[in-house]
Amino acid sequence: MSSGILEVRGLSKTYVIGKNSIEVLSGISLDLEAATTTALVGASGAGKSTLLHLLGALDRPTSGTICFRGEDIFRKNDRELAMFRNKSIGFVFQFHHLLSEFTALENVMMPALIAQIPRKEARGMAEELLEDVGLAQRMSHRPGELSGGEQQRVAIARALVMSPAVLLADEPTGNLDMKTSEGVHAVLAKLQQKKGLTLIVVTHNEQLAAAMGRTVRLVDGRLE
């Protein structure tokens, strides 16, 4: 039985702007194994974030397929894709996108509540994750009362509250200083090991890329 969790075949993405067509990705084929770590690297504009968005079903490709555990995800309709994302994929972005009016705990609970998980159960799930990321004493704080690194840890906890199989991180430390970045790297590594995550990180941070089990380089929308 294959241990592949994501199988990418002939993936291309073209954007049409006015009369111009811009090909961002061309003919990407890639296998990603379960419970592994991969860094996506390359120059700005190489197509890294676009590939990550396609892997997470945030956008549809122009051509090609992505199979998750053997199933072509883009055969799903938009509602089914939304359910797939909420259950199977976690996202962490450079900017945390936390809801400022809610506490850290409430932010982490949000995906579980959207999935109609009972509030008591959702709270327990969120509390455990906030403890895992080192914020047991900061659960009642709102984002504005947290440091940049703490906010990103809350975002990581929120991304994992539904126990996804895959965590996609787009420049997760791009907005942080070196020391804070190291702390976030350590949290990602700890949770990847603990939960057996397939972790895929877009990064310009050479230290983070070096810590990943595999590095995939994009050059002008193609795999090098």
Image (cartoon, rainbow, N blue to C red):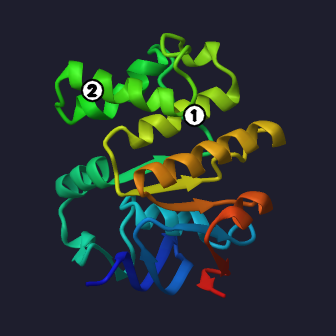
Disc 1 marks which residue?
153
Rendered location of residue 222, percent (x, y) = 60, 85
Q: Secondary structure at mark 2?
A: helix
Q: Earlier in the sequence, mark 2 or mark 1?
A: 2
Q: Secondary structure at mark 1?
A: helix
Location of residue 2 with respect to 197 vertically, above or below: below
Rendered location of residue 50, percent (x, y) = 53, 66
Q: Residue at x 27, y 73 (%)?
A: 69
Q: Amino acid at mark 2?
A: Ala
Say which quadrant the C terminus sits in: bottom right
Q: Residues within 10 Å of mark 1 (few under 14, many from 20)?
A: many
The one of 20 and 59 positioned closer to us in this rendering: 59
Q: Residue at x 43, y 66 (%)?
A: 54
Rendered location of residue 166, percent (x, y) = 40, 58
Left or right relative to 70: residue 92: right
Rendered location of residue 28, percent (x, y) = 50, 85
Q: Amino acid at mark 1?
A: Arg
Q: Residues within 10 Å of mark 2 (few under 14, many from 20)?
A: many
Q: CA distance from mark 2 to mark 1?
A: 18 Å
Numbered tag placed on residue 122 in the rendering? 2
- The answer to whether the residue labelled 2 contacts the one labelled 1, judged by CB atoms less than 8 Å apart, is no
